Structure formats: structure tokens, C-alpha cells
Image (spheres, coloured by chain):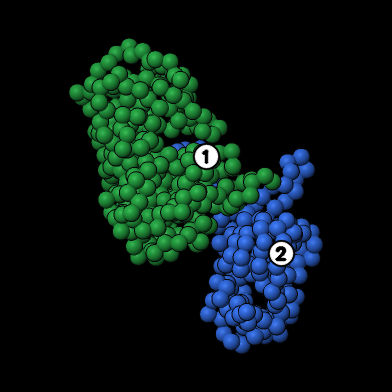
Chain colours: A green, B blue
Amino acid sequence: MAPAAEFPVSQTAPEPLLPRVVCVHRRRRDAPRVWTLELQTAGEPQPPFAAGQFNMLTAFGVGEVPISFSGDPAAPQRLVHTVRAVGAVSEALVRLEAGAPLGVRGPYGKGWPLEAADGRDVLLVAGGLGLAPLRPALYQLLAQRERHGRITLLYGTRSPRDILFRRELAAWGTRGDLALEVTVDHATTPWQGHVGVVTALIAHARFDPQRTLALLCGPEIMMRFTAEALCAAGVAPEAIHLSMERSMKCGVGTCGHCQFGGFLLCRDGPVLPYALLRAPLRVREL
Amino acid sequence: MQPLAQIIAQHPVFSGISAASLQLISGCARNVCIDPGQFLLRHGEPAHTLYLLRHGHVVLEIAAAGRGTLAVQTLGPGELVGLSWLLPPYQWSYDVRALELVRAVQIDADCLRRKSEADHDFGYDMMKRFMPVLVQRLQATRLQLLDVYGTGR
């Protein structure tokens, strides 16, 4: 059990740029350098969030970074974020222990278009840490399972030790109403699963390209190749959605740091259809 | 039981193949079953065969001193195992091991090469069918080399 949290400051967020102070309730290591933080509030209601949206998290005295929600949208009071330690701020965030304060503002951005999933097959393709922003979408899809056709999760990562959310993946793997395939780029002997890039799994996945909604999240190169493979399989670019990542600073479309072609990803994205992204993704300077 | 020619024609690599070409391939082919753990191909050995996988998965792997056995790629139903028979020195570059019971069509590659040399139209058709597999694997290998999951998101 985590110790009772102390809140140095407790406030609501009347301004969109003003962080609320929350505390770490629990922290779990999911993979090398990847931690999932469960955050605790002082009791004030947290704003609801949509799957695919993000919060700006502040490590006090260090800085602020955008981190996608990785928890269940049906339980917005339980703020869950999965963080890879890749820079000063994220390193500081993953070092926070239970009870430590941090700042949160958000939710920001446009999430996965799950309203378009009714009556359709849904293909989720995750690469590396990209499984985290897709997890809320999967929670929501599975909560309304009868409303959708086939649901398939294809997950690719670097090696078996980098696989996130192992327990949940194991549980999802036993469900008869979810097709799950995991592949790794490199493996040694004990691994008996797929080895190869995630795009190689698409050819074996069962979905009707004419009525499929595809949700992609992962490194940009992986999403580009996956989107092209899906288009080649007959999925319309309008039905393929990518979660994009750029340097988000303000979160509200003011500062322009996350500009990508004609989009401000914090405001217009991070989730956008491939039909709109295909051209800018080919521009090297972007 | 399905005739061998029909099984070959249903494999994605030979989709839409002509009856004449199918007859030439079938003359070099046979059905095989491989038990889990058995090797289909061995690194360094002459590349005399290729396999059209029908059921079960195999792993391409290489033994590295001090690092154990490294898996490079897994292949499953609808895929092709073995491409080194296409070009000299006709020698396997990896071990290929069955991860489970594998059912496959085994094709005598020497026989296929001889028929391709004797009939260049047939040989060109074969090349057009195997080249996409090579290109797809090259693309996949490049993606693996990029190590896209190493940094970023």
C-alpha cells in the first residue's frame, strides 16, 4: 500500500496553463526505463479524458513534458501515465516515489475517433511505448465489445524484455473476442513468439479492409510503413489514424512548437487521419 | 486429400500461376511434415530446397558464441522458407527450426533451377514471384536495422 500522499498545494485549474498539483500514488516498472505512474489527487474531481489525449506533466524544478493517458477513460479519477525516461524531465518523473508531488495540466488534444468504430473491425497497431496511448482505446472498445466487429491488436517492440503491460497482454491473449499478436525485432532462445517487424503481422491479421478502422501509435517510421501496408491491403487512408508526436509545449495551440505542416499537433492532434498526414509525412524538413 | 498441384496453386507465392508452370513446379515438389524442434535448413549446408509453409511457424536463427541462439525472423502459413537456392553459392545463411508441427510443400530447388534454365519464360515467371519476397524481407530487415523502438515515444 502506498503511503498517504501529502499535497503541498491543492487547487483546481482555473487557467488552461496552470498545473494542478497531484501526487504519485503508485509507480510500476513496465520495461527497462519505462514506468507507469498512477497519480492521486487531493479529492477534487479530475476532468474526464478521451482515449488518445495527453496531459502535460511537470517535474517541479526540472520541466514539463506531454505524456499520453494510458489508463481507463471510464475511471478518470485514476490518472495513469506511462513514461519512458529519455530526457531530464522524464528521468525526473520516473524517479518520483509514492507521495511525491508533480504538476498536471490537461487533458489536451484530440483522441482516437472511437465513435467511428461502431459496426466496424478495429485494428490497433502499436510499436514500442505506443501501446500506452492505445491502451485507453482498447479498454473502451472492449467495454463496448458488442458494438464492434473483429478487434485486433498487433504489437511490435524491440525485444521480449521491452514488452509493456505483460499481465494485461496475457489476459487479452486468452479472450476469444480479441485477436492479439506480439512480435519483437530481436530475440534469444526462450522466446517462442513472432520475430520480425510489426508490419509483417498485417498480412496475417483478419479484418475487412472496407470496414476497418485502424489506430496506429508508435515511432513515426513504424507508423508510416504500417499505414502504407494498410493502404496496400485496401484500407482507406481516411480510416487510418496516427498518433503524432512533436515538441508540445503549451498544449493549447498557442506557442507553435508542435507545428507539423498546417497542424498544431497539441490542438489539432495528436491523433489525425493518414489522409491528412500522408503528404506532410513525406516532407523531410518537417 | 488435395492434389499437390492444387495446394501449390493456393499458396500466395504461386497465386494465378499458369497450368503449364504449375505442372513444372509440381514435378519438383512433395508434401512434408516437420516435427517441432526439427531443423528445416542448417546454416552453411547446400541450399537444395525451399518450403511453402501451409501450417505452423518456423524461426530463422543463428547461433552466436557467447550470445546463445539469436532469432532473426519467424515465418508462418502462406510464407516461403529458403531463398539462398536462387543465387550462388547456393548455401543456407541461417538455421531454420520448426516452432510447432509444420506442414509444408518441399520443392527441390535444383530441379526448379534446371527447369528455369531450360525454359526462360518459366524462369522469368519464377523470378517475378520470388523477387517480391526478397524485397519485402529486405524492407523488413531495414526497419529492424533502424531500431525504431530504441528512442522516441
Residue at 25% x, 31% y: name it: A47
Residue at 28% x, 42% y: name it: A110
Vertical comparison of A147 with B21: above or below: above
Q: Position of residue A44 (x, y in %)?
A: 25, 22
Q: Position of residue A286 (x, y in %)?
A: 38, 45
Residue A11 or residue B138, whichever sits in front: A11
Residue at 64% x, 46% y: name it: A191
Q: Which residue is mark 2?
A: B34
In the rendered structure, which amino acid carries the disc numbered 1? Arg
Residue A35 or residue A169, whichever sits in front: A169
User: In this orientation, does residue A94 appear?
Assistant: yes
Which chain is indicated by disc 2?
Answer: B
Query: In the drawing, does residue A253 fall left or right of residue A138?
Result: left
Task: Answer few, some or many: residues within 10 Å of disc 2's Cα (few below 14, many 20 plus, some between 14 and 19).
Answer: some
Task: Answer few, some or many: residues within 10 Å of disc 1's Cα (few below 14, many 20 plus, some between 14 and 19).
Answer: few
Residue A6 picture quarter: top left
Which chain is indicated by disc 1?
Answer: A
In the rendered structure, which amino acid carries the disc numbered 2? Ile
Q: Position of residue B77 (x, y in %)?
A: 58, 65
SS at mark 1 in the image: helix
Residue ranking furthest to the right: B45
Q: Which residue is mark 1?
A: A166
Vertical comparison of B27 with A83: above or below: below
